[in-house]
């Protein structure tokens, strides 16, 4: 059995702010990782592409409140920052919206 990639260790370098905010980002990053594992069988964020995070934000969260989508967008921005990407998914409109 393979061990799942440690998302907490991955994000430690870019986490800052209040303890509660760090915990929220870690909890949300684990939820993002779980959803991407279930959909694409990719547990390592270094394997993720822009399309995976766009799918999570636009499809997986489409029935959640706007505030929930916003807070997940902040976590996605941290993942992008850690990966050294500049995809800028915050504020991206959903298809058909």
Image: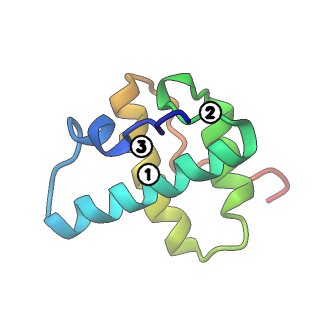
In terms of sequence position, does the residue under pointer 1 or pointer 3 come before the other?
A: 1
Indicate the secondary structure of the residue bearing disc 3. Answer: helix
Which dot, 3 or 2, sits closer to the camera? 2
**Spatial CA span between label 3 and label 2:** 19 Å
**Rendered residue at 31%/45% (across/down):** 8
Indicate the secondary structure of the residue bearing disc 2. Answer: loop
- In the picture, measured across the screen, residue 55 lies left or right of residue 43, that is right
Q: How many marks?
A: 3
Q: Is residue 91 visible?
A: no
Residue 81: which quarter of the image? top left
Is 33 in front, or is 91?
A: 33
Residue 45: give x, y in percent of width and height.
49, 31
**Circle 3 is placed at which residue position?**
77
Residue 96: give x, y in percent of width and height.
85, 55
**Spatial CA span between label 2 and label 1:** 14 Å
Mark 3 Cα-neighbour bin, 10 Å: few <14, some 14–19, many ≥20: some
**Circle 2 is placed at which residue position?**
42
**Spatial CA span between label 1 and label 3:** 11 Å
Q: Which mark is residue 29?
A: 1
């Amino acid at each position: 059995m393979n061990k799942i990639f440690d998302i907490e260790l991955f994000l430690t370098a870019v986490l800052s702010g209040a303890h509660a905010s760090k915990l929220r980002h870690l909890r949300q990053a684990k939820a993002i990782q779980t959803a991407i594992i279930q959909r694409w069988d990719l547990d390592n964020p270094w394997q993720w592409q822009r399309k995976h995070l766009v799918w999570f934000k636009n499809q997986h969260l489409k029935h959640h409140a706007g505030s929930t989508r916003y807070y997940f967008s902040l976590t996605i921005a941290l993942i992008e920052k850690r990966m050294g990407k500049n995809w800028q998914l915050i504020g991206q409109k959903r298809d058909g919206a």
